[in-house]
């Protein structure tokens, strides 16, 4: 039985704990203003905003699902794994995220050096200020480039300098996709492949190590892409999730507004059922 579609769900959002523009509490307030009933906070390689977001939603009509988005690598591409309902306080989970944070900081410093050599100098100290207490990411470098007047927008910063093939791009510490799935499962969470495009070559190995879901409802997916992903989810017994990949009101081109991904509300119950199973299997 499907739940009424007048509910609003967004299972992919970011805050200042990574590279989002809103604090966790401000994100919760915006979700309430927009009439959302469920959001998941899924910061990049960071869980520092979860306690604040959950506390801000306590006593309101909004449920905050604890989540994370882990960055991983495959040849010539990045693969992101979403984790839901994991024990984010677990020592082994925190230790791995600390490695991510250290890698991100060193990466941003190297990018600043490269940008200087390219004639677009920025202050690494300023990048850290923009990131605040959050996990440093490329959007923070991009904002520093905008502030310094080298580019007109965050999108231009990416396309001109810091995209994967850009002249100032720097690799950083990452897990393999399989390791990320295992890490999320070990923490009792539900691993879901984020914004999958061409999954040829790596979907089956991920399913074999315990992948439990696909992000199907995502901005930019047309009906054909969504149908293909739904078919894959059914073929491999995966749940479907979805979200806006919201980073802030001054959103980047590849993200949509909070709550705009039109995620069917029944997705939440299926995710919760899978989370119960994952904790039993842990």
Image (tube, rainbow, N blue to C red):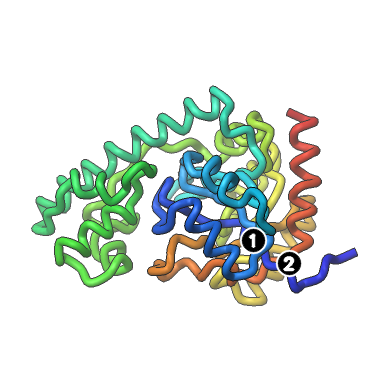
Tell me, yes or no, whether the two marked residues, 1 and 2, touch with CB atoms within 8 Å.
yes
Q: Disc 1 on helix, strand or loop?
A: strand
Q: Identify the residue at horizontal 86%, vertical 66% (top origin).
A: 2
Q: Is residue 74 left or right of residue 183?
A: left
Q: Is residue 72 visible?
A: no
Above or below 248: residue 192: above
The disc label shown at residue 67, or none: none
Q: Identify the residue at horizontal 61%, vertical 76% (top origin).
A: 222
The span from disc 1 to disc 2 (Cα, nearest Å) is 8 Å
Which quadrant: the N terminus?
A: bottom right
Q: Nearer the viewer, residue 211 or 232?
A: 211
Q: Disc 2 on helix, strand or loop?
A: loop
Which quadrant: the C terminus?
A: top right
Residue designated by label 2: 264
Q: Nearer the viewer, residue 230 or 33?
A: 33
Residue 258 falls in which quadrant of the image? bottom right
> How many C-alpha atoms fall within 10 Å of the one at disc 1: few (<14), some, or many (≥20)?
many
């Amino acid at each position: 039985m499907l739940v009424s579609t007048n509910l609003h769900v967004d299972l992919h959002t970011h805050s200042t704990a990574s590279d989002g523009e809103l604090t966790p509490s401000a994100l919760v307030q915006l979700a309430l203003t927009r009439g959302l009933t469920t959001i998941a906070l899924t910061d990049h390689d960071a869980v520092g905003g979860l306690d604040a977001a959950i506390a801000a939603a306590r006593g309101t009509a909004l449920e905050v699902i604890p989540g994370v988005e882990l960055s991983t690598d495959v040849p010539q591409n990045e693969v992101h794994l979403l984790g839901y309902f994991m024990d984010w306080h677990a020592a082994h989970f925190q230790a791995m995220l600390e490695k991510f944070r250290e890698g991100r900081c060193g990466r941003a410093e190297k990018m600043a050096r490269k940008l200087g050599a390219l004639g677009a100098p920025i202050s690494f100290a300023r990048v850290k200020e923009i990131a605040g207490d959050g996990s440093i990411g490329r959007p923070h470098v991009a904002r520093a480039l905008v502030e310094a007047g080298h580019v007109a927008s965050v999108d231009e910063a990416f396309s001109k300098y810091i995209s994967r093939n850009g002249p100032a791009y720097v690799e950083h510490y990452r897990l393999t996709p399989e390791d990320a799935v295992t890490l999320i499962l070990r923490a009792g969470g539900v691993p879901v492949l984020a914004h999958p495009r061409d999954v040829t070559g790596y979907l089956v190995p991920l399913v074999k190590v315990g992948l439990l879901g696909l992000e199907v409802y995502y901005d930019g997916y047309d009906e054909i892409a969504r149908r293909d992903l739904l078919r894959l989810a059914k073929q491999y017994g995966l749940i479907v999730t979805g979200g806006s990949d919201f980073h802030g009101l001054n959103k980047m081109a590849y993200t949509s507004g909070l709550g705009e991904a039109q995620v069917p509300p029944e997705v939440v119950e299926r995710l919760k059922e899978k989370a119960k199973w994952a904790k039993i299997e842990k």
